[in-house]
Amino acid sequence: MSHIATRTPSPLRRFWMRSQGTLLPVITFLLVLLLWEICVKVFAIPEFLLPAPSAIWLATTEQAGLVWGHTLATLRTVVLGYGLSILISLPLAFALTSSRIVANAVYPLLILTQSIPKVALAPILVIALGANELPRVIITFLVAFFPLVVAVTTGLLSVPGDLIELGRSYRATRLQQMVQIRMPYAIPFIFSGLKTAVALAVVGAVVGEFVTSDRGLGYLIQTSTAFFRMPLAFGAMLVLSLMGIVLFQIVAVAEKLLFPWSSQQQAD
């Protein structure tokens, strides 16, 4: 009887297999930065058109205190708008799922709110509410809440009819069906909406800062481009991107910790 020898992967290969999901994006990003730096130097592209990554890094680190202050201001707006979108979206999705009358009455209004360009709405909100943080929070909320409502509603309605009939056979009330049947089944949809919404919340906060603000990364980008300080503007833009990635990953980690079966179900 012959035995087929199986080679044990080397430690380096095992490390690569475990971490390639993290290492590949990092390596790709570093290669893009290297190519960017080379192209700027070789083609002598002016800094006010496209600064090199080294210039962006230098300008951002030299103004680290300023960038950090504006980052905290934007993060505050994102968290407030995102939190408001969660507080309103979840009960609204439950209402849309529970009542066809509510769905027929409210859903067209939701579509209407999304058909209005937020850049056009922001100046109106500033006039109505004043030049403070509230208009920026509302803009952030309006950008973030619609995909969350749609995702949660889709998840609650995607429960197989057999499960609902089983619940009814056990005389489960509508509230019990919602909490014990529909909610657990909709968890992957809910977190999918939460991850989409948190990324869009960063976009909404910057839109609000472009229109009315004296602080925040959107304001920093606007003032830096006005004075042709492009390295600092690019640095603020990269910090915004990093903020979106970090917030997205926080929601993803929360899903894995609270509902590990949900992330496993999506992977399958």
Image: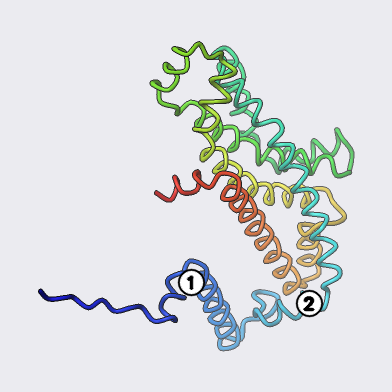
In terms of sequence position, does the residue under pointer 2 or pointer 1 come before the other?
1
For residue 120, above or below residue 246: above
Please identify, in this view, whether the residue under mark 2 or under mark 1 is nearer the observer. Answer: 1
Which kind of residue does numbered mark 1 sit on? Leu
Q: Up-down: is 57 above or below 197? A: below
Q: Which residue is mark 2?
A: 61
Q: Amino acid at mark 2?
A: Thr
Q: Which residue is mark 1?
A: 24
Q: Nearer the viewer, residue 261 or 115?
A: 261
User: Whole-percent x and y of residue 192?
Assistant: 54, 43
Residue located at (78% from left, 43% from top): 80
Tell me: 93 left or right of 213.
left
Residue sitting at x 60%, y 50%: 257
How many marks overall?
2
* Quadrant position of the N terminus in the picture: bottom left
* Above-or-below relation of 237 to 77: below
- Apparent side of residue 7 relative to residue 109 in the rendered image (left or right): left
Determine whether, in the image, residue 4 is placed left or right of residue 17: left
Residue 147 location, x and y as percent? 58, 38
Name the disc covering residue 113, or none.
none
Q: Residue at x 44, y 12 (%)?
A: 169
Q: Position of residue 206 (x, y in %)?
A: 73, 52
Q: Is residue 75 above or below residue 14?
A: above
Q: Residue furthest front?
A: 1
Determine whether the residue tagged by mark 1 lies in a helix, strand or loop.
helix
* Secondary structure found at label 2: helix
User: Which of the 4 image quadrants contains residue 137?
Assistant: top right
User: Badge 1: few (under 14), some or many (20 or more) residues near its Cα, within 10 Å?
Assistant: few
